[in-house]
Amino acid sequence: MNMYDLIVKKRRGGELTEEEISWMVEGFTKEDIPDYQMSAMMMAICFVGMTKEETKHLTLSMAKSGDMLDLSGIHGIKVDKHSTGGVGDKTSLVLGPLVASLGVPVAKMSGRGLGHTGGTIDKLESFQGFRTDLPTEQFIRNVNTIHIALAGQTANLAPADKKLYALRDVTGTVEQMSLIASSIMSKKLAAGSDAIVLDVKTGDGAFMKTQENAEDLAKEMVDIGKLAGKDICAVVSDMDQPLGYAVGNALEVKEAIATLKGEGPRDLEELVLTLGSQMVYRAKKSDSVESARRKLEGALHNGMAFSKFLEWVEAQGGDIRQAKDVSLLPCAAYQTEVFSFEDGYVENIDTEDIGRIALLLGGGRETKESQIDLSVGLVLRKKKGDPVQKGESIAVIHANDKEKSEKAVQRLLQAYHISANCPEKEPLIKMIIE
Ligand code: URA
């Protein structure tokens, strides 16, 4: 078998066999297949697609490319959550400690930023000393003692996906349904949780731009999870505007902390409660989704969720002074208000562009080696449907470079569409697939 033939076969619309896929994944993991050939294969898949069978084989080959974590040492039903990626998506930072505060064992594997979307690991590194490379024994111990641990994908957990994820991030090959499904599910299967709650985003800021594609992706992942014996569901949620107001690593951490104290944006709180009630119910800590939601609402507003957050940050080596006093988190040198040129309502926000503005400011990676700037990003002041007056601020740009800040202001003005008509409200939660 050789990689050249497989690339040409896929480019011509052929279906790769189980044997070919597992040979390719193994060769890429061992570095026998170079990045440039794998990039060509990813691009061919973006154009031609993959069948359900191919997607299943790719998922299983990637899951088996390293260690399958044995989390049987954790007491209780372990739940994991994963988002397909969005702009301003700081859900995991709130959801993890919130659910853990009710005694649900949260054993969470998270990733770094991908394309125009941010990643939980990058955000958590806003806390000095926060470690995401926990050895398995400590990961298990933390879940057993404080009910939550979060780790980045270690070198040995689905290493094929880890390499492929970094490659897709910089080769324009992220937005393909089968690649996203196999990337997410390979990690979830290797990570050993009993239950999985997926947050599948749809809209301009998501990889799946239409609800139909998001539903297909959700169904595909739920099918793969069931096949592997997992208790799994997917929530399809709106990403036609950023979630909450903050976009950028440390800025999102600040907003997450406000939400953990019951003072967060309504959309973020609603999403957290919807996903969280599924997690609590599936962990059998509540006899219905509705009663799980009531308990979670209590924890957000009585201090339990924020206390758990502090406990978690401390257990992973982070500096909790920055959580108690958010002015100690990384902060950019320049803050520039962006003013509207017209009166009306925010009809639409080009959400992928908002994510790209955060990248332009230095909040994401342009190459595999790029270092990210945790302090930069933007905070929206207006969201869809909000009335705006000429000269009123619509957002604040946080930058460390004046030239980049000016470019960001121009792009932000282009990303906002203001019209005389107030747009109809879109539901945040589109559907739940069980
Ligand atoms: N999240 C992942 O882990 N992988 C993807 O491909 C997209 C989102």
Image: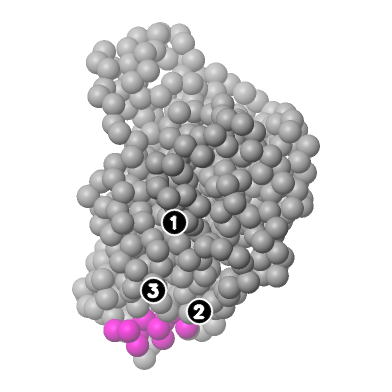
User: Which stretch did the figure color magenta?
Assistant: 17-26
Using a 10 Å C-alpha cutoff, classify the residue at mark 2 as few (fewer than 14 neighbours), some (14 to 19) or many (20 or more): many
Task: Determine the residue positioned at 29% across, 75% down.
Answer: 54
Q: Is 359 placed left or right of 138 in the picture?
A: left
Q: In the image, what residue type sits under mark 3?
A: Ala
Q: For the residues marked 2 and 1, what is the alpha-carbon distance in whole angstroms?
A: 28 Å
Q: For the residues marked 1 and 3, what is the alpha-carbon distance in whole angstroms?
A: 17 Å
The circle on residue 65 is: 2
Residue hosting label 3: 228
Task: Determine the residue positioned at 54% across, 82% down.
Answer: 30
Single out the residue that lies furthest toward the front.
287
Q: For the residues marked 3 and 2, what is the alpha-carbon distance in whole angstroms?
A: 16 Å
- Characterize the magenta stretch by its predominant secondary structure: helix
Between 32 and 429, the residue placed more toward the observer is 429
In reply to whether residue 289 is colored magenta, the answer given is no
Task: Determine the residue positioned at 49% across, 57% down.
Answer: 283
Determine whether the residue tagged by mark 2 lies in a helix, strand or loop.
Answer: loop
Q: In the image, what residue type sits under mark 2?
A: Ser
| x and y, in percent, of residue 58 in the image | 37, 75
Tell me which numbered mark, 3 or 2, is placed earlier along the sequence.
2
Between 46 and 94, the residue placed more toward the observer is 94
* Residue 133 visible from this viewpoint: no
The circle on residue 282 is: 1
Single out the residue that lies furthest toward the bottom.
1
